[in-house]
Amino acid sequence: MPSVEGWAASSFIHMDSPEHDRLRRMATRHFGPPHTPGLVTGLEGFLTATVRSLIDVLAGKEQIDVVDDFAFPFPVTVICHLLGVPRENEPRFHLWVNDIMNSIDYDPKTDPKEKLDNGVQARKDLRQCLGELVEQRHGRPGDDLLSRLANDDDGPDGRMADADIVATAKLLLIAGHETIVNLITNGMLTLLRHPQVLQRLRDEPDLVVPLVEELLRYEPPVQIIPWRAAYSDITVADTVIPKGSQIMLMLASGSRDPKRFHDPDRFDPDRRDNQHLGFGSGIHLCFGGPLARRETQIALTELVRRLDRPRLVADPPPYRPSPVLRGPIHLDIEQGDG
């Protein structure tokens, strides 16, 4: 077994073509259409059962935290199931993700160094565990994503290297987790601020499809992508951006461009022609988007249906300090008679 450092390959979201294209093709062969078209629909029962089991615990509580009690544990459970992580290992994955997410907002001026150290150790432990799981899958084909990637010798690009499988699994677990937490939480906060839309969703469950698209435009989980660079001199709005310049893509701003969207600062689930930037664009368009959409659709539909007269405890809630990932750290709501 290689050392932990040997598994530290970068995921393909940090790569350019042609290496990005090769690794993305290999991953998406087993993550959705056209090669595995039934992946997301095949998870419908599991997603619904997981959401309902989490809400069952909340049903009798007068006050709940949408983040800690629901939005945080849900996507970890889903990705572990998708990857094929044994159920007995899942609690460790929850702890590792928690430590990693806490370390992202580390502030050396106010936070104990233990917060950063825990995140570093969690990344190492996660890489080690994923590497061991990949090794165990060799020669043992199965339906889970790790098994598919570890035994795929038939694709045009060959089999993905183990280090790249680990990096792809980490990408799904960490990046996929944080975006879903923020999207669900931002969605519930937006609905509580627009009670007439919340009631419409109760009465018209099919509204959830355009509603989630409007959430991705109006309050996206990823607001900025700061790690792009210009390949050549480009002109934008009569301004020349020199080749090699660092570029920050303001996705949230673009999705509220008044030249593109009518009344862009209004939350409107009936909005037509809603080509937002909530999942990015181009070759780096989020390849987990179809799963993220369905997770959020099911989560919001069930929360609205099951919670009893939910209302905000504080508005605005406390937010994480990151300008890249936007979402409340906690979203406390009361339900019932109060």
Image (tube, rainbow, N blue to C red):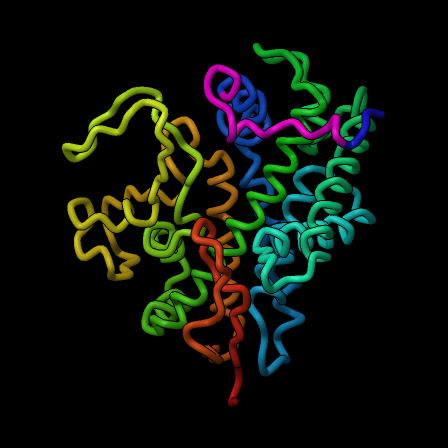
Residue 15 on the magenta span: yes
On the question of residue 45 being in view, the answer is yes
Nearer to the camera, 219 or 102: 102
For the point 53% across and 31% down, the residue is: 32
- In the displayed structure, does residue 103 sit left or right of residue 320? right
For the point 60% across and 39% down, the residue is: 172
x%, y% of residue 249?
35, 39
Q: How many marks?
A: 0
Residue 255 on the magenta span: no
Task: Write the start and end of the magenta stretch as one range.
Answer: 5-20
Nearer to the camera, 142 or 327: 327
- In the displayed structure, does residue 336 sit left or right of residue 77? left
Task: Tell me the quadrant of the picture where the N terminus can be found.
Answer: top right
x%, y% of residue 20?
51, 21
For the point 49% across and 53% down, the residue is: 296
x%, y% of residue 150?
72, 23
In terms of image quadrants, where is residue 132?
top right
Residue 308 higher or lower than 51, as above or below: below
